[in-house]
Image (cartoon, grey):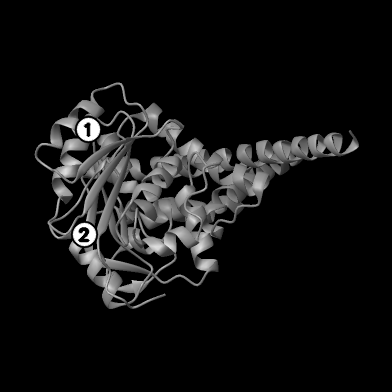
Amino acid sequence: MSSVVLTGITVIVPTYNEADFIEDCLSSMMDDLVTEVLVVDGGSSDGTREIVKGLTVRYPSLRLLDNPRRTTASAMNIGLETATGDVIVRLDAHSLYPPGYIARLTGVLQEHEADVTGGVWDAVPRKASVFGRAIAASLVNKWVMGNAGFRVGGGEVRAVDTVPFGCWRADTLRRAGGYNEDLARSQDYDLVQRLRSMGAKILLVPDVTIKYKARSGVWENVKYTFWNGYWVGHPVAAWGVKFSTRHLVPAGACLAGAALLGVCAVLASPWPLMLASPYGIVLLAAAVEARDRPAPVVALMPLVAAGTHVLYGLGTLWGLVKGVLARVAAGRAGTAAAKR
């Protein structure tokens, strides 16, 4: 990694039907330091594109690019191919960014000769229902989502295994091969694993807080959590993509729970379920972690935590099954092709 002065900052914002969020997102991060802002859109039909085009009058550095594949990974690669800056900042359209966000992250990138920097991730509900507030609280609860540095925050600038969204040295991102477009989700975790294998320096900047507008509906969260788990299991089994151990813990817990239920059925006794009692402590700890929230949110937290773990774990297991089947099918196709 070079210590030369970085010049030019390119911001990339993947979008698809983000009309409710895109203007607030862009307005919150516009900075004189930014060379160009690339909104890479997957063919939005809700007015997102029109909003972005309208904002180009206010923000001359803003450009709208097309993303035919619609995925975040393809959007980032399109932006990376177009970018002229030495620094790439990825933004999420559902988030708001504090004043000086880009200046602070690029300053740490330069000062510490890092490859990637990122801030602390906080969550606010899109709707102020009890469930919506509980979901938002769960996303920053270490007993629900794990103890990643960007979720727990605090302390000084420090090395971590991942950061949300990211402020990158463009040459590092390109040397890593960009984003894996086979992944509809989990593309960030995959990229981080490749960066870490290269010896990249990833730093958390805990005095920078990103406000993420979390989904607040029950069904949308059920689907979102399940498919997040799926896009861990499937890439692991299908292509050998590596993830941190914490991403696989819910799947292991689901298997252990199923095994306990099987033992109960064989013995015709509920007593083996006592072995699951430590998990009850985890659920209680999740509620205690949320004790500064309103009482109804605290009361709901064990249910939200259990639901998140089960849905994510089942999604991962289903992804593993589908991934194994995909790999077997690919192997058979390759064998048949070799025999021709």
16 vs 12, nearest the viewer: 12
Residue corresponding to mark 1: 127
Query: Which type of secondary structure does the marked residue at label 2 adopt?
Result: helix
> Could you say which is closer to the camera, residue 139 or residue 55?
55
Which label was assigned to residue 82? none
Amino acid under disc 2: Ile
Residue at image coords 40%, 43%: 78
Q: Quadrant of residue 220?
A: top left
**Residue 111 percent across, percent down from the top left:** 26, 77
Residue at the image position 50 percent from the left and 67 percent from the top: 196
Residue 20, position as x, y percentages in the image: 21, 30
In this rendering, the answer to whether 204 lies above or below 319 is below
| Amino acid on which the number 1 mark rests in the picture | Lys
If the image is split into quadrants, where does the C terminus sit?
Answer: top right
| Circle nearer the N terminus (2, 1) | 2
- Pointer 2 residue: 102
Q: Is residue 156 visible?
A: no
Q: Is residue 176 above or below residue 200?
A: above
Q: Is 292 or 63 nearer to us in this picture?
A: 63
Quadrant of the rendering where the N terminus is positioned: bottom left
Mark 1 surroundings within 10 Å by alpha-carbon count, few (fewer than 14), some (14 through 19), many (20 or more): some
Camera-side mark, 2 or 1: 2
